Image: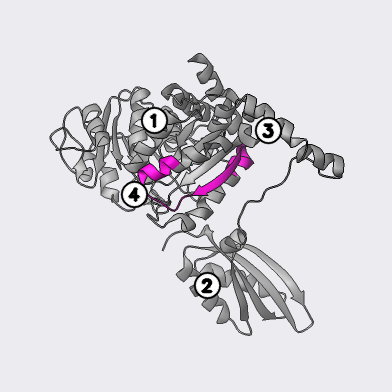
Amino acid sequence: MGNPSPGYSLTLRVETPASITVTSELAAAVGAAGGSVTALDVVESTHIGMVVDVSCNTSDAEHGDRIRESLDQLDGVEVRKVSDRTFLMHLGGKLEVNPKVALRNRDDLSRAYTPGVARVCQAIAANKDDARRLTVKRNTIAVVTDGSAVLGLGNIGPEAALPVMEGKAALFKQFAGVDAWPVCLDTQDTEEIIRVVKAIAPVYGGVNLEDIAAPRCFEIERRLRDELDIPVFHDDQHGTAIVTLAALKNALKVVGKKIEDVHIVVSGVGAAGHAIIQLLIASGARNIVACGRQGAVHQGQDHTDPHRIWLAENTNQDNFDGTLHEAMTGADVFIGVSAPNVLEEEHIAAMADDAIVFAMANPDPEVDPIAAGRHAAVVATGRSDFPNQINNVLAFPGFFRGLLDAHVSDITDPMLVAAAEAIAERVSDEELNPGFIIPSVFDPRVAGDVAAAVVSAAQSN
């Protein structure tokens, strides 16, 4: 059983006898069942009984059932209802559209809509660049997916991907003031995806590709970047790479090592792994071994995928041909963007002294973080319930804010590196320690720092 998480948060409405000890008894029962109480609220009370809402975090749905049973077993206690707080948050969706202008009378209507709007249409027809100045295009991006690689859930389709894309759009607005809208496409044909995105592009100032499976995502991004005049950013690749590099820069400070000297093992050679490796090399890394399901990628293999060919040519200089487990021996850094539980504690113990472990598979990492922490100097995951969360939210809102502000369409390695450096520098030397190598996603300064770094890098090109 995993640790209790806000992702499995329940509110149990229970009827109890009137007693001054009832809330402590309820909390003790939840705790004994392994839950984490977050709130106890008395919603009804009489001289003979009470109704109490018990909110708690659980580890999964089965754990929630066990907590309900533990409360039902208390004398005089009856669980009336169980509400899943995550599903409640998603009821009706997480987004809405609000007008930015007041429509109070006929004059307002005549300017916002007909006849006045026709003058604005004519201005844009005469100069299409005015669409950025006079419409939502200046601050709006499309969050595009085909539902083929959603979180760690796999190919679950566009409808099931929609809650993630809604969440992404909400994060854009919350952290960087960027208006974003989910575009979930009912096709996984590369050419059709490219055609559809090109057709809707006039509305948007940028495109954020999300949760599209490799290797199709590489071709889609490349073609759209070539054929559109707005920036196209695949967050699963480049957002992950930015935050990983930021965290690694600070982790290396903690252990007193340099990126050009360390031996790095990367588990996962899909979209995220490929982009991470590219950015590490752009930042000076020299000794990287990339491992897929069949072990280390090396030049002795018969590669047909151009991305595997690139990895074989640009990593693993010693042409190591062993397994992931064998590659871990003596490694300074492990970066995982692959699958849960591919490593055991013994593999972390075999790493070099003062090792760094980034186990970022979600929701279950490549190795138990607690076990890894018994041997590695720095451990990070993609989860919010462990220290050092490597979370794309630190990158993509500010990165797109910078792209929109700079009015650029090309995304370059210097922009990505600058964004990573901005995130890393938000943790001061006085704050830096093994449990704090990356700022909180709720640090209000991060998005602005990233945006400014992107604008500066764009202007330097």
N-terminal label among 1 and 3: 3
Residue at image mark 2? 67
Is residue 422 left or right of 273 when viewed as pictured? right
What colouring does the structure picture have?
Answer: one colour
Q: Residues within 10 Å of mark 2 (few under 14, many from 20)?
A: many
Residue at image mark 3? 121
Q: Kindly state the secondary structure of the residue where label 1 is placed.
A: helix
Q: Amino acid at mark 2?
A: Ile
Q: Residues within 10 Å of mark 4 (few under 14, many from 20)?
A: many
N-terminal label among 1 and 2: 2
Residue extent of the magenta highlight: 171-195
Residue at image mark 1? 255
Is residue 429 left or right of 89 when viewed as pictured? left
Residue 366: mark: 4
N-terminal label among 4 and 2: 2
Residue 243: mark: none
Q: Amino acid at mark 3?
A: Cys
- The verdict on residue 175 being magenta is yes
Residue at the (55%, 70%) spot, across then down: 30
Distance from Cα at disc 1 to Cα at disc 3: 59 Å
* For residue 1, above or below residue 328: below
Say which of marks 1 and 3 sits in front: 3
Q: Kindly state the secondary structure of the residue where label 4 is placed.
A: loop
* For residue 47, above or below residue 163: below
Say which of marks 4 and 2 sits in front: 4
- The verdict on residue 376 being magenta is no
Furthest residue in direction left, as rendered:
300
> Picture coordinates of residue 73 (x, y %)?
55, 82
Q: Do tag 2 and tag 3 residues touch (Cβ < 8 Å)?
A: no
Q: Do tag 1 and tag 2 residues touch (Cβ < 8 Å)?
A: no
Distance from Cα at disc 4 to Cα at disc 2: 28 Å
